[in-house]
Amino acid sequence: MANNDSPLGGVPIRHRNGEPYNGAVNAYYLAADYDVAMFIGDAVLISGTSNDTIYKGNEPGTLPEINKATAAGSTYLTGFIVGFDVDADDLTKTYNPAKNERIAYVADNPDLVFEIQEDSGGAAMDETDVGNNAQLVYTHSGSTISGKSGMELDSSGAATTATFKLKILKLVNREGNLIGDHAKWEVMINLHSQRYTTGF
């Protein structure tokens, strides 16, 4: 039976030591001139700047600015978006449109384990990929209805490459989740900005 094709981006599920994810997040800044829509589950990276004026009670410099992470390359990740602050202009808005100033809440602990769906763009991953590293892929757009990310794990290039963004831990142990296209995997961030020793 085929796996359901239901990408959600990266979803925090537990800590590396087995403790359950307790919902802890940090607040980050999405600038009004950032021309990219953001969705729950998107991978993000701090941009090296922050809010430069008081924003919703937060003093200048207190909200690190983030951008959507690139799919490939050796750039680092800060975490995955798990939600946004309330948009008073539209209480039904489940995602953040381009050029919309807002606070995003990010699961950014370097020891978090995330669930992510692999794509179907190449040879499906299997048990021999456990322990390998992998990249992201943006085959699907995020949903403006559910607010969920369309980002997936790139199955075509899982390898021992040290500069890939994610570390593959294991297949999610869930009935109906089988090795093959659109399988769900447990991963950690391999290149984490909070462990990077050089400034941005």
Image (tube, helix red, strand yellow):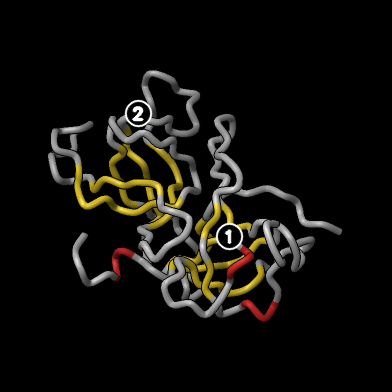
Instruction: Name the amino acid type tagged 2.
Output: Asn
Instruction: Look at the image and tell me in which quarter the N terminus lies.
Output: bottom right
User: Which secondary structure lies at badge 1?
Assistant: strand
Please tell me which residue is depicted at 52% across the width and 73% down the height of the picture. Answer: 133
User: Which secondary structure lies at badge 2?
Assistant: loop
The number of numbered badges drawn on the structure is 2
Please tell me which residue is depicted at 68% across the width and 70% down the height of the picture. Answer: 125
**CA gap, disc 2 and disc 1:** 27 Å
Residue at numbered disc 1: 153
User: Please, which residue is most extreme toward the right here?
Assistant: 1
The first of marks 2 and 1 along the sequence is: 2
> Which mark, by number, is residue 199?
none
Residue 82, percent across and down? Answer: 45, 47
Q: Quadrant of residue 76?
A: bottom left
The answer to whether residue 75 is left or right of residue 178 is left
Image position of 108 with respect to 82: above or below: below
Q: Nearer the viewer, residue 106 or 179?
A: 179
Image position of 52 with respect to 128: above or below: above
Tell me the crowding category of disc 2: few under 14, some 14 to 19, or many 20 or more residues within 10 angstroms, Cα based.
some
Please tell me which residue is depicted at 77% across the width and 56% down the height of the picture. Answer: 3
> Which mark, by number, is residue 100?
2
Instruction: Name the amino acid type tagged 1.
Output: Leu
